[in-house]
Image (cartoon, helix red, strand yellow):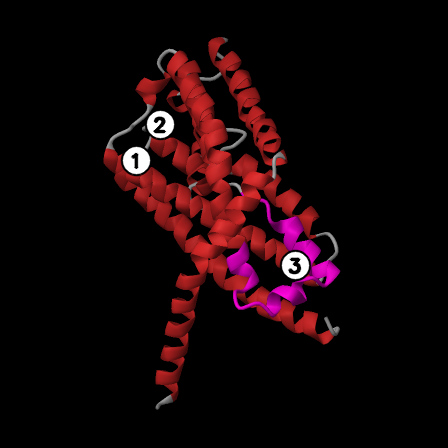
Amino acid sequence: MRQDDRIGYHDYHNMARLIKIYPALLRLYRRRAVAYRATYIIVLVNAAFPLVMMSIWIGLAQQGATQSDGYNAVNFAAYYLTAIVVRRITACGIVRDIEGLIRNGDLSVYLLRPVGLLHHFVARVLTTRLVVVPIVFVPVVIGMLITPGVVQTLDLHPLNLAVFVLACAVGLAFEFITQYTIGCLAFWITQAHGVNAAFALAKSFLGGYIVPLGLFPLALQTTLQMLPFQSGVALPVEILTGRLTPEAALARITICAVWVAVIALFMRLIWRAGLRSFSAVGA
């Protein structure tokens, strides 16, 4: 058998093994997510931030202080109510856990398991969506129904919803890959969560969580639309609120997907280099 044939068989065997293991892994982390009651409180507290920003921007709009890019009080309400749900879909917090595993040496346990650490975190993040999204979904829908004009701003056509789901998937991938990469910095530094805090601040401001991208100057809007930060909030929200055509949305999703692929490659390099460093100190 040629070397190429052996490599192909090895990759196929690994994929088949993952397909068999993943259902059990997902069930395990789903039970863990449901059992962790503090999750409900954390989600509700985090959901309060968009409501605060919504109140601020609605107040400014009602005073005539901002009408940029067609935003008015109704548009701001639709934007931030949608952002609550979108953020629960795309957000994940894994940096401190990865940092802890590396610093405490517990990573060694995962290196001996048949499924790598990456897959454990993928299963954990995916199953957590099943817990955190429903917590905010029903209250947000009620809020939209009782706020005049908000539902009318949403584009709920099947094609647009499909594009919205794709945008959310890319946003979650970006969040996961970047956080995993930052977590891997713990192989060399002791405060990887500090780097993540700076990243989170930049992402919130440049990704539409604090300020809708439509309120930035036009030149800066164009720049931000070429960066991946928009995938976490701004891009999915703009799609669902009917501010983008499917064609324009797909173009921006493609840009974000390319960024995700590049960051994933960088993450792989960082992970391999980190493992060599981890093994060198006898862990």
Q: Earlier in the sequence, mark 3 or mark 2?
A: 3
19 is within the stretch colored magenta: no
Q: Secondary structure at mark 1?
A: helix
Q: Secondary structure at mark 2?
A: loop
Mark 3 residue type = Leu
Nearest to viewer (mark 1 / mark 2): 1
Q: Residue at x 44, y 44 (%)?
A: 171
Mark 2 residue type = Thr
**How far apart are labels 1 and 2 at the CA level?**
10 Å
Q: Secondary structure at mark 3?
A: helix
The circle on residue 265 is: none
Q: Which residue is mark 2?
A: 241
Kindly report the secondary structure that dominates the magenta region of the rendered protein.
helix
Instruction: Name the residue nearer the viewer: 129 or 255.
Output: 129
Task: Confirm or deny contact between disc 3 and disc 2 (CB under 8 A).
Answer: no
Q: Earlier in the sequence, mark 3 or mark 1?
A: 1
Mark 1 residue type = Leu
In which quadrant of the rendered view does residue 75 lie?
top left
Q: Residue at x 75, y 73 (%)?
A: 281
Relative horizontal placement of residue 87, taking residue 282 as reference (left or right): left
Task: Confirm or deny contact between disc 1 and disc 2 (CB under 8 A).
Answer: no
Q: Residue at x 24, y 37 (%)?
A: 159
The span shown in magenta is: 92-120
Instruction: Name the residue nearer the viewer: 104 or 67.
Output: 104
